Image: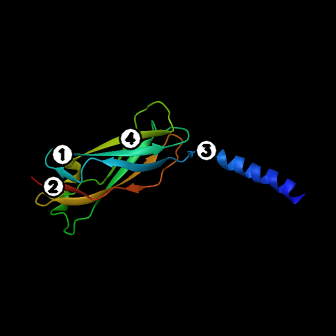
Amino acid sequence: MKTKILLPFVLLAVLVACNKDKFQTTPTIKIKNINTDVVEAPNGTLKVILESTDKEGDEGGGEITYIRVRTNINPIPNPTLYDKIDTVKYTIPSFPKTSKKDIEIEIPYNFMDEDPNKNDTMYFKFTLRDMGNNQSDTVSSKTVIAKQE
């Protein structure tokens, strides 16, 4: 008798577990690819591909934020002249809604270069906010070097 009562509950639990959504309302991002770890002066570009998943697929029109975190031991010489902004926010272009997509970000050398005499070492933090105002977790890149000429 106990087996007959327990079996339907076990089957129900298995069915509910199998029908869980693969994606969530809150977007998730991960770094899929970074083209290099050394960006050459003066015209090099760091290309980062983020893989985004979102249940509604409403990242288009949302916002990507990336922050440069400089890790050099020596401070920036003459900060009033060479210190640059470290945070960039931009609107993601509109595109057809899909639950999984790649977003490519291009970061130019001149954004990374702060010390006019030495290589700059840094990593980047990325986050995404979709059109529903849901924000992803923050992901960090590997270390990147902006190499002087």
Q: List the residue tagged with mark 2.
A: 147
Q: Residue at x 40, y 34 (%)?
A: 93
Q: Amino acid at mark 2?
A: Lys
Contact (Cβ within 8 Å) of mark 4 with mark 1: no
Q: How far, Cα to Cα, is label 2 from label 4?
A: 25 Å
| Label 3 residue SS | loop
Please provide percent x and percent y for residue 139. 40, 55
Q: How far, Cα to Cα, is label 4 from label 3?
A: 22 Å
The image quarter in which residue 72 lies: bottom left
Q: Amino acid at mark 1?
A: Gly
Label located before the other in sequence (2 or 1): 1
> For the residue carrying disc 1, how many other residues have a C-alpha within 10 Å: few (<14), some (14-19), or many (20+)?
some
- Looking at the rendered image, the disc whose residue lies closer to the viewer, 4 or 3, is 3
Please provide percent x and percent y for residue 43. 16, 44
Q: How far, Cα to Cα, is label 2 from label 3?
A: 45 Å
Q: List the residue tagged with mark 3.
A: 21
> For the residue carrying disc 3, how many other residues have a C-alpha within 10 Å: few (<14), some (14-19), or many (20+)?
few
Residue, far right: 1
